[in-house]
Image (spheres, coloured by chain):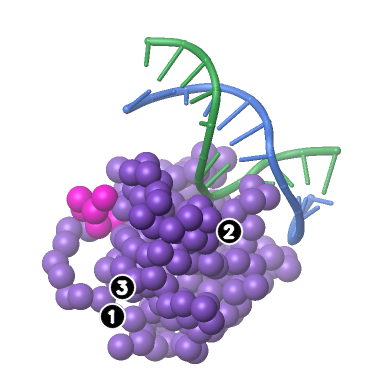
Chain colours: A purple, B blue, C green
Amino acid sequence: MKLDRSFYSRDTLILAKELLGKVIVHKTGEDILKGKIVETEAYLGVIDKAAHSYGGKKTKRVETMYGLPGTAYVYLIYGMYYCFNIVAKEEGVPEAVLIRAIEPIEGVNGMALYRYGKNYDELNNYQKNNLTNGPGKLSMALKIDKTLDKEDLCKDRLYLEEGQQDKFNIIETTRIGIDYAEEAKDFPYRFYIEGNPYVSKL
DNA sequence: TACGGGATCCACT
DNA sequence: GTGGATCCCGTAT
């Protein structure tokens, strides 16, 4: 079942936790790729020095974060990778959740092709274990790039659906790769599923 | 296993 | 002109 707008129209920290266990679906036109979300990070805009929208900054890049909840925010990082985020809260409030890691569910061979240019059974163990366990990696595997920035997740091309209702513990800790963010680097805004092998960093 | 540097580019200043 | 919400590979332990 596809998740609708009301799912995303919530407090960003709550949404970041609720997203764990949900399934991302991307219909590329060639294949259907699905992955379960196992790790997220919240970015709280105005008060959060780690967020692109810190202080209410509104530039061309971050304007997506001001859009409707349930919108994809995709940006280029370090010149070579894309990060996939989901806009939260309400229109006009620039908060979002970064998807940091997923567990491959369906279309695994397609993911291997997009990521390494090889079929899944041609990958070595290192490559199999590193298919989707990081924000740049999962974007590559799911074929998410800049053209999907501003994509509405309430449509049929890229969306989320309810996963299996399995139980898991949520670990709450600090975010990664934001050492420049002063006091904000210590905010406990990262969440992941305890024990899941696809989490990027324990 | 852990650390360090290089790749590569566009929005922002 | 600068630098980042990253990844990968080489080198060292």
Residue A83, by quadrant, is bottom right
- Which dot marks residue A22? 3
Q: Does label 1 or label 3 sit earlier along the sequence?
A: 3
Quadrant assignment for the C terminus of chain A: top left
Asked whether disc 1 touches disc 3, contact meaning CB atoms under 8 Å apart, the reply is yes
How packed mark 2 is, by other alpha carbons closer than 10 Å (few <14, some 14-19, many 20 or more), is many
Question: According to the image, label 1 marks what residue?
Answer: A162
Residue A51, located in which quarter of the rendered image? bottom right
- Viewport quadrant of the N terminus of chain A: bottom left
Give A160 or A61, whichever is nearer the viewer.
Answer: A160
Which residue shows up at 61% across the image and 73% down it?
A149
Identify the element where label 3 is drawn. Answer: loop
User: Given the image, on which type of amino acid does mark 2 rest?
Assistant: Tyr
Q: CA distance from mark 1 to mark 3?
A: 5 Å
How dense is the environment of label 1, judged by Cα within 10 Å: few (below 14), some, or many (20 and up)? some
Q: Nearer the viewer, residue A53 or A198?
A: A198
